[in-house]
């Protein structure tokens, strides 16, 4: 059964924009239909605006954000390449796993979960890495890492940024920051159902890419030949309805304006975090590095994590996320992203949480 009246405020899929939902219901086109190809071109151009880049190879990879992560690594990392990875949460851990599967020499730079990475520690971890990878907005902790500072000191390395939870919710400026490649997901601040990974790859990364990646499906050279230009080469059947939905959501986002979206997320995040502290919760992510779109709090002593989250879901139709990894059962992760980032949802969540805890 599909439930349509829930307020999804976890770290995963959030309520999509109405425009995105409508995009899923449009009549189906063929993936080589000229009308669809024109829509795909507009989608890629709108993604360039949202990413803040002129990169020609900017496109929606067919797959969730994890497909974007794998595409980034398999196209740039081969056996023996040195990859420095900043790790302060689950998705930094996953980067290490994916890079290792490519045969890379992985150099980890760890920070405690809930704390930001030290850019200088990341930059000094190895004298000549091929890739420096880090998560911009760590979904497992609600911490923002300083991608711009790392990119500013990268030297000859390529900087790879995970922007799954940041794109559309907080400033992302690929060209201004000099980031070489980045990926995101549709289900967070872009307000689209999960299933696509917005991706961008710059000229330095293109020049140093792996000519024949381990993955045929995620070979960006082949995908790029399909998604851009007039002499398109068939690669795979595009997920037409998903791209149509993304096209509609990007239109809604750009109609609002990126600054408007960033401001709305900031306002809702501030209201949520202030309200949680007034209820007696301790915010987990480090001050100054807290994401407005994903707030993390410590579960109070004596409170049953699963029982409270279940009560919120069954009584009020509100879903919030639990902790992961070593923080499972100890942290709540409350998303306020995309279309869900509305003050009315913040007010509803705070009232429902207060009532649930008072029982």
Image (cartoon, grey):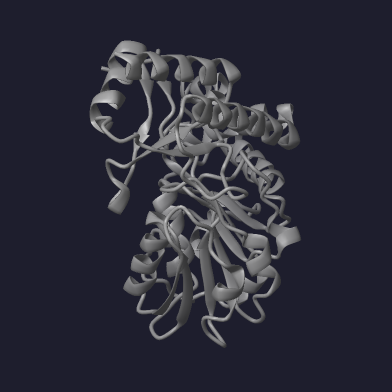
Q: Nearer the viewer, residue 220 or 336?
A: 336
Q: Nearer the viewer, residue 240 or 154?
A: 154
Residue 257 visible from this viewpoint: yes
83 vs 299: above or below: below
Query: Percent position (x, y) of residue 111?
Result: 46, 65
34 vs 151: above or below: above
Q: Residue at x 31, y 11 (%)?
A: 315
Q: Residue at x 56, y 88 (%)?
A: 127
Query: Percent position (x, y) of residue 209?
Result: 53, 74
Q: Find residue 167 and report its image quarter.
A: top right
The image quadrant where one finds the C terminus is: top left
Q: Is residue 152 left or right of residue 265?
A: right
Query: Percent position (x, y) of residue 102?
Result: 36, 74
Q: Nearer the viewer, residue 305 or 177?
A: 305
Query: Percent position (x, y) of residue 65?
Result: 44, 49
Q: Residue at x 71, y 32 (%)?
A: 263
Residue 225 visible from this viewpoint: no
The image quadrant where one finds the N terminus is: top left
Q: Residue at x 50, y 47 (%)?
A: 285
Q: Nearer the viewer, residue 196 or 104?
A: 104
Q: Is residue 158 left or right of residue 66?
A: right
Q: Is residue 124 left or right of residue 84?
A: right
């Amino acid at each position: 059964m599909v439930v349509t009246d829930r307020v999804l405020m976890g770290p995963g899929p959030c309520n999509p924009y109405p425009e995105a939902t409508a995009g899923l219901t449009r009549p189906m086109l063929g993936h080589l239909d000229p009308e669809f190809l024109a829509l795909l071109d507009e989608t890629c151009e709108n993604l360039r605006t949202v990413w803040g880049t002129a990169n020609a190879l900017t496109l929606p990879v067919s797959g969730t954000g994890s497909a974007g992560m794998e595409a980034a690594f398999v196209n740039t990392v081969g056996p023996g390449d040195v990859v420095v990875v900043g790790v302060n949460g689950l998705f930094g851990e996953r980067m290490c796993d994916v890079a290792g599967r490519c045969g890379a020499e992985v150099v980890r730079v760890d920070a405690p979960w809930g704390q930001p990475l030290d850019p200088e520690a990341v930059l000094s971890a190895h004298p000549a890495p091929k890739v420096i990878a880090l998560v911009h907005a760590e979904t497992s902790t609600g911490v923002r890492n300083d991608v711009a500072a790392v990119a500013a000191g990268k030297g000859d390395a390529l900087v790879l940024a995970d922007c799954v939870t940041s794109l559309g919710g907080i400033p992302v400026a690929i060209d201004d920051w000099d980031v070489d490649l980045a990926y995101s997901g549709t289900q967070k601040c872009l307000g689209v159902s999960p299933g696509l990974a917005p991706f961008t790859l710059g000229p330095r990364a293109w020049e140093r890419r792996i000519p024949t990646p381990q993955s045929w499906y995620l070979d960006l050279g082949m995908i790029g030949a399909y998604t851009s230009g007039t002499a398109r080469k068939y690669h795979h059947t595009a997920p037409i309805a998903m791209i149509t939905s993304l096209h509609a959501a990007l239109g809604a986002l750009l109609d609002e304006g990126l600054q408007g979206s960033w401001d709305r997320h900031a306002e809702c995040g501030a209201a949520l975090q202030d309200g949680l502290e007034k209820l007696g919760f301790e915010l987990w992510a480090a001050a100054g590095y807290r994401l407005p779109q994903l707030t993390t709090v410590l579960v109070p002593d004596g409170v049953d994590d699963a029982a409270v989250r279940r009560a919120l879901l069954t009584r009020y139709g509100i879903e919030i996320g639990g902790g992961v990894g070593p923080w499972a059962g100890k942290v709540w992760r409350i998303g306020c992203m995309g279309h869900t980032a509305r003050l009315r949802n913040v007010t509803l969540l705070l009232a429902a949480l207060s009532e649930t805890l008072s029982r």
